[in-house]
Image (cartoon, grey):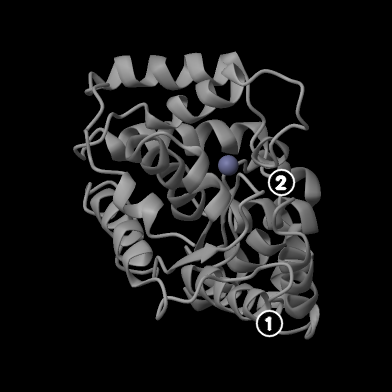
Amino acid sequence: MKKSFVFFIGLGLVLWSNPVAAQLFGNFNLFSIQDDIQLGKQVEAEIAKNTQEYPILEEARYPVAYRELRRIRDEILQSGMVKYRQNFEWKLYIIHDDKTLNAFVTPGGYIYVYTGLIKYLDNEDQLAGVMGHEIGHADQRHSTRNMTKQYGVSFVLGMILGRNPGQLGQIVGALSGNLAGLKFSRDMEEEADAYSVKYLARTRYQCNGAAGFFEKILSQGSGKEPPQFLSTHPSSQTRVRDINQRAQEEGCSTKLSGQPYEVLKNSLP
Ligand SMILES: [Zn+2]
């Protein structure tokens, strides 16, 4: 009994160490939930140190902004559809940078929203749509799924088993050094969009709020340099169409919630 157990573990390791076999597991993730949390915490610490690139808005000076953003986050978390609602901290940070239309999330659910994005959007439903999208990335564990694929299974296993000390640090460095450029696959972007709709369907927000954001970007046309959000979140009419189609399938409300977005906007510097 013990022997066969060891055999199957061994066989599993051999299979997983094979990159071709790894390819077969699209949603395969060798990291544990604790790894996601630990990675997130380390990236959070790296970002806190890099105040030039990530000037975090101080909560003590802008309590209303954080309160309002948390209200939106909590409504999404209370949708009952966020799998790791209890496991992850879902900490929020506002980055004081009006020129950047972006938001991003680390593994383990540390969410960063730029003041530029909050100011750009027209209503709370659009922001909820974007936040739902980011929560979707973390909750579906896209970063560690990506890393399992990218770095290869044997590398990740070695790291987890402690054979490659220091490499976790390298990965954290790579993640936090180029967070805005942290690339998810097209499939992952679609999945995050789909989850945004699923979450918002169970809130008071219009469930296709994320589409509202992309429509606004599209309607602005070219002329200016493309918003930074597009470099991490490839936008297209297809994406708007897909989000709206998901909303139709869910049968959820696409009416604006009418939440007073101005409170949040006016609370920013
Ligand atoms: Zn995304």
Helix, strand or loop at label 2? It is loop
Task: Give x and y (percent) for residue 168.
Answer: 73, 77
User: In the picture shown, does residue 13 fall above or below 130?
Assistant: below
Q: Position of residue 164 (x, y in %)?
A: 80, 81
| Label 1 residue SS | helix
- Please state which amino acid type lies under the numbered disc 2: Lys
Vertical side of 167 occupied by 178: above or below: above
Which of the numbered marks, if any, corresponds to residue 183?
2
| Residue neighbourhood size for the residue with mark 1, other residues' Cα within 10 Å, grouped as few (<14), some (14–19), many (≥20) | few
Identify the residue position indicated by label 1 in the image: 49
Image position of 132 (left or right of 105): left
Residue under the image location 72 percent in, 64 percent down? 175
Ligand 1 quarter of the rendering: top right
Q: Are marks 1 and 2 in contact (CB under 8 Å)?
A: no
Q: Specify the amino acid type for callout 1.
A: Lys
Q: Does residue 118 appear to the left or right of 221 in the view shown?
A: left
| Horizontal side, residue 164 vs residue 4: left or right | right
Q: Measured from the top left, where is residue 152 in percent x and y?
A: 78, 57
Closer to the camera in the image, 81 or 114:
114
